[in-house]
Image (cartoon, rainbow, N blue to C red):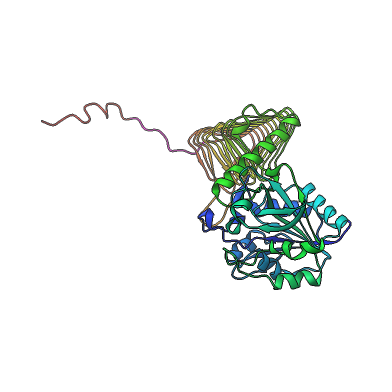
């Protein structure tokens, strides 16, 4: 923005109707806290300072956003929105303040930018975004006379005639940082049904001098807030629908959009198919021409072009071009599956790199390892990477063959082209192209089982 401004986000509300010990702004929407969505929208204004006002539960909010460049202000006992903005007075200095509720997560950057422009053009002291709802419920009503805003009346304080008004306050304000603004905030009264200092009372204070304006915004769903878990579920549906539509319009196939769950930070390439019950959470990226799902959960993972992942869980993993993962595989942080590699059912990979064309078809654990190209990991094979104190690395050379139920006790290296016989417990390095056979000899006792279990009597 050309004009310097500060942003104040109100995050001190107890969220009583959420029936939760978790601060309301930390409840997730599309896998991200509500406050994360608001901060993202606020950042589009390029504010000089972003202030987050917290109250009870504030420490949890501080910890959750400790890596963000924001200033936290403790409101103390929450005594209303006016009291919250007043608490931020020493933290702001720009000529404009944009005040955002921490529980209105879908507000688009364009709405904030237009509000600032509207405020500046009309030289208001107080302006806000309004919306029209067929059933306004708990929202504060915008009272107009001859088209001009004269006050906002909260639902608990409204008369029957005022409750019939459909234009309501979004809680998103633009304020001019002037001495008279702070004087008015300091002079607010708690003489209302909630016993709180209402920020909305500023409207009645400055309206007589033409210092107030309301900018109606549509669609109304952009400005909906979260008061309870029903609201949270409603907004989840709205946001997921928007995210799915955006991907489909960009060339992604989603046969059943209502059964796919997306993060706003997820990216998907053209001609990829997202089958039902697929979750793309966090900063997951999927390339072109992939098949993801059904029944797949990807968190902060990358899947390259042409790969297929189904009925599997990926956390912080990388799947390279044309690889195949699943069904029922688990790729943990640090897993990297090479080009055209195959990780099958009930295979777990953690902090390990599998080279091009590696096959781990079923029932294996590969942890803290590097597996060379075209190696084969048999069913039940494991890398024994943890000695109870430290983790150790396993290296498996290109083209090596690890037999069924083999246990590789790290630190260990299996050379290129080497074979490890089924059932072996290998504790020493195996040279290239050698055979490691480490199991006790088989003993057969003829007739031993004959008559076993028969009664002596």
Q: Name the residue nearer the viewer: 139 or 391.
A: 139
Q: Name the residue nearer the viewer: 342 or 26.
A: 26
Q: Classify 68 as above or below 405.
A: below
In magenta segment, residue 439: yes
Identified at 84% across, 65% down, the residue is 95
Asked which quadrant contains residue 321, the reply is top right
For this view, does 48 lie left or right of residue 142? right
Residue 170 seen in this snapshot: no
For this view, does 396 lie left or right of residue 365? right
Say which quadrant the C terminus sits in.
Answer: top left
Residue 60 in the image: state x and y as whole percent.
Answer: 59, 62
In magenta segment, residue 265: no
Q: Which residues are magenta?
A: 437-444
Name the residue furthest left: 457
Say which quadrant the N terminus sits in.
Answer: bottom right
Residue 276 seen in this snapshot: yes
Q: Tell me which secondary structure the magenta stretch mostly adopts.
A: loop
Identified at 61% across, 71% down, the residue is 76
Q: Name the residue nearer the viewer: 34 or 113.
A: 113
Residue 301 in the image: state x and y as whole percent.
Answer: 67, 42
Q: Classify 429 as above or below 159.
A: above
For this view, does 439 lie left or right of residue 171? left
Identified at 75% across, 55% down, the residue is 149
Residue 96 in the image: state x and y as whole percent.
Answer: 82, 62
Q: Classify 299 as above or below 341.
A: below
């Amino acid at each position: 923005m050309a004009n310097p401004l500060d942003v104040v986000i109100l995050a001190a509300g107890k969220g009583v109707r959420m029936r939760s010990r978790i601060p309301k702004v930390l409840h997730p929407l599309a896998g991200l806290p509500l406050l994360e969505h608001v901060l993202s929208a606020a950042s589009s204004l390029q504010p000089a300072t972003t202030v987050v006002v917290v109250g009870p539960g504030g420490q949890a909010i501080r910890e959750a956003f400790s890596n963000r460049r924001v200033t936290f202000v403790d409101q103390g006992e929450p005594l209303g929105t006016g009291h919250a903005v007043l608490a931020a007075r020493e933290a702001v200095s720009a000529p404009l303040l944009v005040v955002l509720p921490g529980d209105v997560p879908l507000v688009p950057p364009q709405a904030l930018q237009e509000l600032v422009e509207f405020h500046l053009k009309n030289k208001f002291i107080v302006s806000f975004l309004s919306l029209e709802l067929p059933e306004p419920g708990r929202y504060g009503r915008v009272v107009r006379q001859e088209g001009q805003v004269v006050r906002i009346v909260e639902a608990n304080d409204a008369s029957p005639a005022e409750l019939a008004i459909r234009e309501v306050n979004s809680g998103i304000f633009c304020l001019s940082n002037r001495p008279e603004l702070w004087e008015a905030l300091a002079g607010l009264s708690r003489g209302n049904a909630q016993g709180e200092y209402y920020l909305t009372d500023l409207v009645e204070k400055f309206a007589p001098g033409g210092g107030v304006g309301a900018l109606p915004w549509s669609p109304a769903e952009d400005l909906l807030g979260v008061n309870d878990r029903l609201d949270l579920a409603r907004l989840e549906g709205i946001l997921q629908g928007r995210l799915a539509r955006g991907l489909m319009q960009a060339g992604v196939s989603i046969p059943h959009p209502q059964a796919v769950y997306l993060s706003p930070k997820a990216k998907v390439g053209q001609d990829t198919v997202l089958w039902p019950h697929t979750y793309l959470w966090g900063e997951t990226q999927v390339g072109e021409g992939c098949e993801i799902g059904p029944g797949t959960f990807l968190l902060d993972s990358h899947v390259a072009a042409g790969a297929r992942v189904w009925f599997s869980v990926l956390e912080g993993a990388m799947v390279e071009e044309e690889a195949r993962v699943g069904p029922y595989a688990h790729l943990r942080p640090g897993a990297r599956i090479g080009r055209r590699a195959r990780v099958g059912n009930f295979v777990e990979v953690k902090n390990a790199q599998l080279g091009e064309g590696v096959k781990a078809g079923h029932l294996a654990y590969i942890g803290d390892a590097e597996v060379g190209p075209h190696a084969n990991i048999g069913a039940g094979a494991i890398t024994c990477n943890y000695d109870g104190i430290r983790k150790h690395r396993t290296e498996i050379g290109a083209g090596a063959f690890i037999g069924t139920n083999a246990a590789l006790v790290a630190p260990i290296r299996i050379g290129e082209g080497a074979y490890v016989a089924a059932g072996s417990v290998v504790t020493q390095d195996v040279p290239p192209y050698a055979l490691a056979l480490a199991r006790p000899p088989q003993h057969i006792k003829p007739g031993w089982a004959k008559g076993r279990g028969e009664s002596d009597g």
